[in-house]
Image (cartoon, helix red, strand yellow):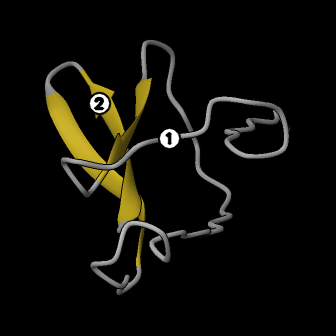
Amino acid sequence: MGHVIKKNLHGNETILMKCSKNMPDSEDKAFSSCYSAGVFYLESGSVVELSVLRKDARLKLEPYYTYLGLYRI
């Protein structure tokens, strides 16, 4: 389980950050939290994409469970 954060600019894809963890197969124990932080220059027209690495992952899309934050410096 984990995620990849990529930047795409004019068809050129760059991996900015990755986080991956081993998880148990048992559904009732398969919970994961993966925190990543970094500072990157995003050119005008950059597209940022977050991808989850596990095809059958279920995400909790509720406050305090799933988030992505960006700051302009």
Mark drawn on residue 59 = 1
Judging depth in this view, the residue of 17 and 35 nearest the camera is 35
Residue 27: percent from left, percent from top: 38, 66
Residue 55: percent from left, percent from top: 18, 48
Q: Residue at x 14, y 23 (%)?
A: 11
Judging depth in this view, the residue of 66 and 16 nearest the camera is 66
For disc 1, the neighbor class at 10 Å (few under 14, some 14 to 19, many from 20) is few
Q: Residue at x 65, y 68 (%)?
A: 35
Q: Quadrant of residue 22?
A: bottom left
For disc 2, the neighbor class at 10 Å (few under 14, some 14 to 19, many from 20) is some
Mark drawn on residue 42 = none
Q: Please, what is the three-letter code of the amino acid marked with disc 2? A: Asn
Dot 1 falls on a residue whose secondary structure is loop
| Residue corresponding to mark 2 | 8
Q: Is residue 69 above or below residue 31?
A: above
The quadrant of the picture occupied by the N terminus is: bottom left
Q: Nearer the viewer, mark 2 or mark 1?
A: 1
Residue 33: percent from left, percent from top: 61, 68
Q: Residue at x 34, y 77 (%)?
A: 26
On screen, residue 10 versus residue 29, left or right, reads left
Judging depth in this view, the residue of 54 and 68 nearest the camera is 54
On screen, residue 34 versus residue 13, left or right, reads right
Question: Total number of numbered labels?
Answer: 2
On screen, residue 6 versus residue 39, left or right, reads left
Judging depth in this view, the residue of 52 and 63 nearest the camera is 63
Residue 20: percent from left, percent from top: 38, 76
The quadrant of the picture occupied by the C terminus is: top right
Quote the CA–CA distance across marks 2 and 1.
24 Å
Q: Quadrant of residue 63?
A: top right
